[in-house]
Image: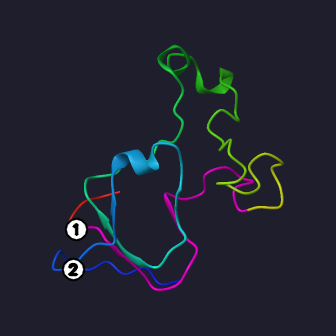
Amino acid sequence: SVISTINSSTPSCDYNLLQIDFDFGTYRIINDGIYCLSENIIFNPLPPDQELSSKSPNSIDPFLWFPKDNTSYPGCRSLQNGPFALGFFSVISIETSNVIIDLQEYEI
């Protein structure tokens, strides 16, 4: 797959991506089309709650931030035999051809 970033003169967006699309992990692109950011994205999937975030990172369960849904994120439960066996490895995974990502001057 080739990632293309183009200017905001894109004719239309098939998919508009918002922060909420990334709050629970990697955004998986499985359909072709034009994907457009609609705001800046901060990638911090499954952050610890307030109580845990005040503790040392070494005292928090190291698997807290791992995906939990093996259907959406193959390999996450067994930690093998799937791309998500290592946890969230990217902000966006492109799993098909003919994809354009238009940042529309936003940032990830």
- Picture coordinates of residue 85 (x, y %)? 75, 54
3 relative to 106 in the view: left or right: right
Give me the disc on residue 65: none
- Picture coordinates of residue 71 (x, y %)? 70, 54
**Residue at 22% across, 68% down:** 104
Magenta stretch, residue numbers: 83-104
**Residue at 37% across, 81% down:** 4
**Residue at 65% across, 44% down:** 67
Rendered view: 23 above or below 58: below
12 relative to 66 in the view: left or right: left
Between 105 and 35, the one nearer to me in the picture: 35
32 falls in the magenta region: no
Q: Are marks 2 and 1 in contact (CB under 8 Å)?
A: yes
Residue extending farthest left:
9
Question: Disc 2 marks which amino acid?
Answer: Thr
Could you say whether the residue bearing mark 1 is in a helix, strand or loop?
loop
Specify few, some or many for label 1: CA neighbours under 10 Å numbering under 14, 14-19, or 20 or more: some
90 falls in the magenta region: yes
For the residues labelled 2 and 1, the Cα–Cα distance comes to 9 Å
Could you say whether the residue bearing mark 2 is in a helix, strand or loop?
loop
**Residue at 20% across, 65% down:** 105
Question: Disc 1 marks which amino acid?
Answer: Gln
The residue that label 1 is drawn on is 104
Mark toward the start of the polypeptide (2 vs 1): 2
Q: Is residue 42 visible?
A: no
Quadrant in which residue 60 is drawn = top right
Q: Main secondary structure of the magenta part?
A: loop
The residue that label 2 is drawn on is 10
Its colouring scheme is: rainbow
- Picture coordinates of residue 97 (x, y %)? 52, 84
Quadrant in which residue 89 is drawn = bottom right
